[in-house]
Amino acid sequence: MRRTALILLLACAPLAGAHDFWIEPSTFRPAAPSTVTASLRVGENFAGERVSRRAERIESFVIRDADGERPVGGFEGRDPAGFVRIDRAGTAVIGYLGKPYPHEVSAAKFQQFLREEGIEGVRPKGKGTQREHFQRFAKSLLGPGDVPPFGWRYELAVEGDVVRALYDGKPLANASIAAISRDGRKLSARTNAEGRAQLALTRGVWLIKSVHVLPTKAADHDWQSLWASVTLER
């Protein structure tokens, strides 16, 4: 029970320490035919806790390949959160779109988060509690190839060593992009006016991530934080 409570706390509190969120497939290079499982993880530095499947938190959980788009199956409250059948070789991308979720954090913690994520031009609203709605946009590449846009509000697309940050389908300039390899290598860059950043992704498994923070005038929250990630193997 204590471990379950910890996982739920981490999953619901991205600004309070362990905040990165990603998809961890059982393999990045599936044979065909085969079944691939997809775990959801939350943590830091590409190490974290597994998150069980919760329907109330999922807006969309799909896989896209040459045959189109289909849902990622799974069992409520279970880990791995999903599984997919790969019937033929090629490029496939798993995508997880979470529902917006409310969260509160102190102004000091919010400022720390902005600094750690390299977010510029944003300051806490006053010295009191900062109310936010966060939303997660995670992808995982299976097989060779690139990671295309899904048409989400905020997302990362990958074309070779070029990462594109897209907000509402348009390039986002000056977005902070970070990449962490499984063995601890770290890269970072900022997007140019075309929303592109160059990262030297050498051999290995990588987590690429970015956060976009927007002020709001909503009655129940001050900020929207949009968390995008991609996992892949080079």
Image (spheres, rainbow, N blue to C red):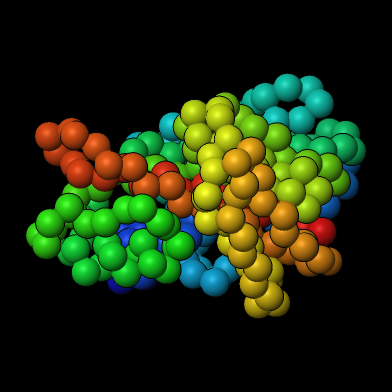
Would residue 75 appear left or right of 213 to someone viewing this image? right
Number of numbered callouts drawn: 0
The image shows residue 146, relative to residue 105, as above or below, that is: above
Q: Tell me where residue 191 appears, x and y as whole percent.
A: 60, 49
**Residue most extreme to the bottom:** 184
- Where is residue 63? Give x, y as percent: 66, 34
Q: Which residue lies furthest to the top in this view?
A: 68
Left or right of 75 on screen, residue 216:
left
Which picture quadrant has residue 208?
Answer: bottom right
Quarter of the figure with residue 151: top right
Position in image of residue 223 (x %, y %) = 26, 45
| Residue lying at 77% horizontally and 62% vertically, measured from the top left | 201
Residue at 53 percent of width and 49 percent of height: 174
Judge whether 44 appears above or below 150 on screen. below
Along the line of sight, the residue nearer the viewer: 11 or 232: 232
Q: In which quarter of the image is the N terminus?
A: bottom left
Q: Residue at x 77, y 63 (%)?
A: 200
The one of 168 and 70 positioned closer to us in this rendering: 168
Q: Can residue 82 be seen in this view?
A: no
Q: Position of residue 147 (x, y in %)?
A: 72, 40
Does the image show residue 90? yes
Residue at the image position 20 percent from the left and 44 percent from the top:
222
Q: Which residue lies furthest to the front in this view?
A: 193
**In screen coordinates, is 109 left or right of 227?**
left
